[in-house]
Structures are given as C-alpha cells and as structure tokens.
C-alpha cells in the first residue's frame, strides 16, 4: 500500500502564491515520476507539471514561467510552487506518483486532491 497526503491548497487573490506539497509513504522501493494534475469544474483533468526521478520537468503551457515543480527524494515529497496565480488556475489539484513497490511492481497512486481558489 502507498499513500499520498497533499497539503497547501486554499484561497488566494490573483497575483498571489501558494505552495502545494504531496508526501508519499508506504511500501515504496523507489519513486519514479511525480506530478500534479488539476481539474476545474466542468473540465477534464489536465497535467500541470511532472518531474522525473532524474529531475527533468515538464509543464503545461499555461503555467510555464509561473509554476515550479520540485521534489525531495529523501522525504518522498513533491512540491508545486505556484506564483502569479490567475483565476483560471482555480481547480482541485491532484498529486500523482508512480512508484516501484517493495515487491518490485509498478503502482500509480493519486492523492485526495486539494482545492485552489484564486479570486479576481
């Protein structure tokens, strides 16, 4: 079993900043990719940012230059620093982690979601 615990969402004014955190725990041998997705009301879930085990990052165009994804491998934690937030960033943000389990299998795990609301 692998669990993800997210934190850091909330209400912020446009132009403000928030930092999301997602900590993984459980039967983990190693963590491969770690990412953040978001889903706004009435829209499909979209990939916001991903970081590989080697530290390579990828962002959706709409957040490039404003959001930064990072990870702390010692803490099995991924972060999403969100700056210059816009009302269109309002969504539930989900952490997504791909792990190699202690038994040698691959497992994709989702966090419970954290709401980010950006007021204009």
Image (cartoon, rainbow, N blue to C red):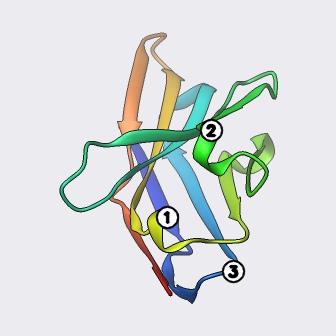
Image marks 2 and 1: residues in contact by CB distance under 8 Å? no
Residue 84 image-quadrant placement: bottom right
Label 2 to label 1: alpha-carbon separation? 12 Å
As helix, strand or loop, the secondary structure at mark 1 comes to helix
| In the foreground, 27 or 12 | 12
Vertical relation: 10 (above or below) 27: below
Residue 35 image-quadrant placement: top right
Q: Residues within 10 Å of mark 1 (few under 14, many from 20)?
A: many
The residue under label 2 is 61
Residue 10 x/y as whole percent: 48, 83
> If the image is split into quadrants, where does the N terminus sit?
top left
As helix, strand or loop, the secondary structure at mark 2 comes to helix
Left or right: 107 in relation to 24? left
Image marks 3 and 1: residues in contact by CB distance under 8 Å? no
The residue under label 3 is 15
Instruction: List the single residue furthest toward the left.
Output: 42
Label 3 to label 2: alpha-carbon separation? 18 Å
Q: Which mark is residue 89?
A: 1
Q: Residues within 10 Å of mark 2 (few under 14, many from 20)?
A: few
As helix, strand or loop, the secondary structure at mark 3 comes to loop
Q: Which mark is residue 1?
A: none
The residue drawn where x is 42% and y is 11% is: 105
| In the foreground, 14 or 109 | 14
The residue drawn where x is 45% and y is 15% is: 103
């Amino acid at each position: 079993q692998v669990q993800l615990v997210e934190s850091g969402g909330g209400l912020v004014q446009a132009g403000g900043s928030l930092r999301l955190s997602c900590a993984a725990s459980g039967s983990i041998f190693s963590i491969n990719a770690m990412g953040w997705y978001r889903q706004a009301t009435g829209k499909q879930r979209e990939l916001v940012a991903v970081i590989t085990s080697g530290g390579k990052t990828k962002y959706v165009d709409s957040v490039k230059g404003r959001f930064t994804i990072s990870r702390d491998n010692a803490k099995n934690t991924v972060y999403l620093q969100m700056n210059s937030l816009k009302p269109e960033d309002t969504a539930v943000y989900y952490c997504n982690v791909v792990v190699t389990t202690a038994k040698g299998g691959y497992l994709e795990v989702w966090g419970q979601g954290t709401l980010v609301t950006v007021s204009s």
